[in-house]
Image (cartoon, rainbow, N blue to C red):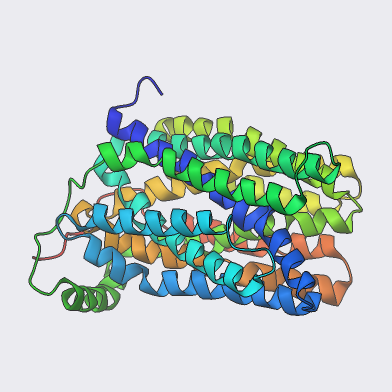
Amino acid sequence: MSRLTKQEKSWVFYDWANSAYSILITTAIFPLYFKAAADGAGLAGSTSTAYLGYANSFGTLLVSICAPILGTIGDFRGLKKRLFTFFVILGIAFTALLAVVPSNQWLILLICYVITVIGFGGANIFYDAFLVDVTSEERMNKISARGFAMGYIGSTIPFIIGIALILLSQQEILPLSVTVATQIAFAITAIWWGTFTIPMLKNVQQVYYVERVANPVSISFKKVLQTLKRIKAYRPLFLFLIAYFFYIDGVHTIITMSTAYGTDLGISSTNLLIILFATQVIAAPFAILYGKLADKFTGKRMLLVGIFIYIIICIYAYFMKTTLDFWILAMLVGSSQGGIQALSRSYFAKLVPKENANEFFGFYNIFYKFASILGPALVGFTAQITGNTNAGVFSLVILFILGGAVLMRVPETTDKIQAFPK
């Protein structure tokens, strides 16, 4: 970190900041807390699960649909930072509210959660696009990878504290109820997110922009429509987004459904949490390694290496039988998940015109969000007709092969598409 500029460090630390939300709120704690609150209110388990699913879908869909418009508005001078700040404050404020809403108010909890999803997702549109403002093209692989690595490391600290509070309260070692311990974990997440966002707010500024116009919202709608009409003309960008859609769908599916695989193998929830923690730890140095190797061998080649490793993961999963097998699989995932995500972000950033980066990262965000639909459906369908979860995981090979095949057709040059006329 000592070799990074102040702007690069500040940008990287936002990954450190918001990753606490990713693991504590969306993955580890809130789903269990909400299920308990809904159960206490008399809702059937299937009903509360459905409501949580609807909430996630609504928040994600809303951000995804609005992403190109928000991004295009953010391209105007002085607006990127304002929009980033708005969504960050929105996400942090409602994460903090989760800590004070009574546990028997399941509907209010769910509404607050949806708003945190919107705040988190909206801020990430502009955070990713700020990559073009904080560093040079030659350093984008390194800085993007460092961000993911810091995110993995940073998320483990509040994760350990939050889980420890809950487990110790369950064992009555701490004089706290599980509800209070969980609420403290929510507060820790909000404080962590807010504290480490300060450097980003203080030191990172919009460098590339288009000049403000009288009606930025209406102009943004027109610009997005123009981009959609012309996007096929941007062959490298268009092909990359198609490749990204397929392979990142496979990556997301393996991450989000990993606990289901482990449960089907008979692995206890405690062991699953330990494995999740270990995967986060190992992902950090490998993300940095991918960034360094990309500078030597090109980002495209390292993305293909990551895709190849995921193909091996899918094949290995077909023969998975024991807890040791699951550990090996988790370590393989940890070796590549950060690298493939980091290099995808930096590779895309090199393709787009800097003054229109927000708009294009809006489209990137759509592909990122919607690449969570095909994979789970493919796994579920295959597992159902074969009666074998391992076969479901193996079916993801199709997505990685398709993604790799399309990525190989992306021209080696990373020359930018032409900037839009003003």
Q: Is residue 149 left or right of residue 227?
A: right
Is 42 left, or right, of 210 in this rendering? right
In the rendered image, the quadrant that contains the C terminus is bottom left
Q: Left or right: where does residue 222 sit relative to residue 311?
A: left
Taking the spot 22% from the left edge, 76% from the top edge, the residue there is: 226
Which residue is at the front of the view, 392 or 271?
271
Q: Find residue 131 and report its horizontal and vertical position in percent.
A: 32, 45
Could you tell me residue 63's position as x and y percent?
A: 43, 69
For residue 280, above or below residue 386: above
- Res 108 quadrant in image: bottom right
Image quadrant in which you'd find residue 292: top left
Query: Residue at point 60% right, 67% down?
Result: 109
- Towards the viewer: 93 or 3: 93
Instruction: Classify 20 as above or below 356.
Output: above
Q: Is residue 63 left or right of residue 324?
A: left
Q: Would residue 329 be visible to someone looking at this image?
A: no
Q: Residue at x 60, y 54 (%)?
A: 25
Q: Position of residue 371 (x, y in %)?
A: 54, 66
Look at the image and tell me in which quarter the N terminus lies.
Answer: top left
